[in-house]
């Protein structure tokens, strides 16, 4: 009778109220992800010690000026042998100083090394974002041109987020004089794909502003490619690195590091793999 209908109406109202509340909460959550995504994507360190304090005393502090007028600090060590220069694009956290342990052996072997300082990192002005980091990369490459290091002697090294910058720079230079080689450590296909791995319950690919869509460019870099990826990487799953590798043109190599995670690949002999790859490229 009347009481049953009243009970069902109450239940319907409560269900509708629950669904409405859930949708509101979900919408707020998605909106917050969209608005604060760059805070979640970039984790810059703000204090930059000296090269000497970081164990790379021979590297010079250099200043480069970007196309949009920012003066950025980077570190540069000239090649001390007839070897190429490794242009290092760091990942999303810390500063270039935190990569000194990776480049130490390359410096010892006589390679040139340019540690590219990003806007918003290590005391540099500006805020990190995709087009900004590309501008930072271009400024670093102009510096190398100005000091007489030709693009054929550049080896781009992109670490995680920096893989997106390295691929973009290689793609741009492919239209001119291609770079010597490209090395990508723990790369991804696009930031949208990487975000979807961590937030499968939201339309992550639609939300990302900074796309770093390497998978759309990698086939056209016109440079030998090496991809190194840990099989146990939980930050950027190996599957994304594999898809990027599959999309690339020859010549290309990949090393899938058994037991390797996202931040510990240099514990698995990566330096030797990199040096062997550069040697092979130079002899071709």
Image: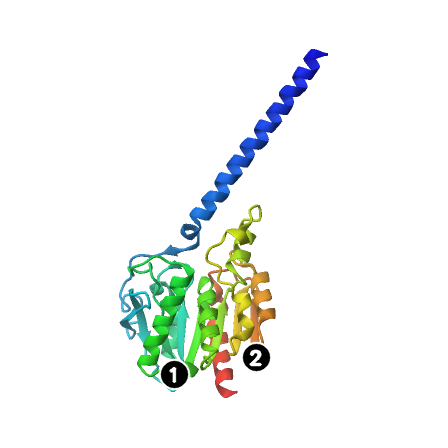
Residue positioned 51% across, 40% down in the render: 27
Quarter of image, res 177: bottom left
Observer-nearest residue: 208 or 52?
Answer: 208
Q: How are the residues colored?
A: rainbow
Image vertical order of residue 198 relative to residue 25, above or below: below
Which residue does the image show at 44% across and 65% down from the upper left? Answer: 162
Mark 1 and 2 residues: CB-CB less than 8 Å, in contact?
no
Q: Is residue 234 visible?
A: no
Graded by Cα atoms within 10 Å as few (under 14), some (14 to 19) or many (20 or more), the crowding at tag 2 reads: few
Q: Which residue is mark 1?
A: 150
Q: Is residue 108 above or below residue 198?
A: below
- Of marks 1 and 2, which one's residue comes earlier in the chain? 1
123 and 271: which is toward the camera: 123
Q: Which mark is drawn over residue 251?
A: 2
Mark 1–mark 2 distance (CA, rounded to whole Å)? 21 Å
Q: SS class of the residue under badge 1?
A: loop
Residue 170 at x, y percent in the picture:
46, 74
Q: Residue at x 54, y 49 (%)?
A: 199
Q: Nearer the viewer, mark 1 or mark 2?
A: 1
Judging from the image, what secondary structure is the residue with disc 2 in? loop
Is residue 221 shown to the viewer in this render? yes
Q: Residue 186: x, y in percent?
A: 51, 64
Residue closest to the eye, 15 or 49: 15
When the figure is inspected, residue 47 is found, relative to residue 270, above or below; the finding is: above
In the rendered image, residue 248, in percent from the top left (x then y), is placed at: 57, 72
Image quarter (top left, top right, bottom left or bottom right) of the N terminus:
top right
Residue 51 position by quadrant: bottom left
Density class for disc 1 (Cα within 10 Å; few <14, some 14-19, many ≥20) is some
In-front residue for pair 217/85: 217
User: Can you give x and y, in whole percent of width and height, for residue 102 in the image?
Assistant: 40, 69
How many marks on residues?
2
Name the side, left or right, on which 281 lies relative to 153.
right
């Amino acid at each position: 009778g009347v009481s049953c209908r009243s009970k069902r109406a109450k239940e319907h109202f409560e269900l509708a109220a629950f669904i409405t509340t859930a949708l509101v909460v979900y919408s707020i959550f998605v909106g917050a992800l969209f608005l604060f995504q760059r805070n979640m994507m970039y984790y810059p360190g703000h204090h930059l010690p000296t090269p000497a304090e970081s164990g790379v005393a021979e590297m010079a502090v250099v200043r480069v000026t970007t196309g949009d007028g920012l003066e950025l600090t980077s570190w540069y060590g000239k090649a001390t042998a007839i070897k190429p220069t490794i242009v290092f694009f760091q990942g999303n956290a810390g500063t270039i100083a935190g990569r000194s342990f990776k480049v130490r052996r390359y410096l010892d072997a006589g390679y040139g090394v340019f540690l590219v300082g990003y806007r918003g990192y290590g005391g540099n002005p500006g805020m990190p974002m995709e087009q900004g980091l590309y501008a930072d990369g271009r400024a670093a490459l102009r510096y190398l041109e100005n000091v007489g290091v030709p693009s054929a002697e550049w080896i781009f090294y992109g670490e995680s987020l920096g893989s997106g910058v390295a691929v973009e720079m290689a793609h741009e230079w492919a239209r001119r004089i291609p770079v010597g080689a490209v090395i990508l450590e723990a790369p991804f296909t696009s930031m949208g794909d990487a975000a979807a791995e961590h937030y499968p319950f939201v339309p992550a690919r639609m939300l990302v502003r900074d796309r770093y869509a390497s998978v759309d460019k990698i086939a056209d870099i016109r440079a030998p490619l090496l991809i190194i990826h840990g099989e146990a990487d939980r930050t950027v799953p190996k599957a994304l690195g594999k898809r990027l590798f599959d999309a690339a043109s020859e010549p290309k190599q990949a090393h899938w590091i058994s037991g390797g995670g996202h931040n510990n690949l240099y514990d698995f002999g990566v330096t030797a793999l990199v040096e062997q790859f550069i040697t092979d490229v130079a002899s071709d």
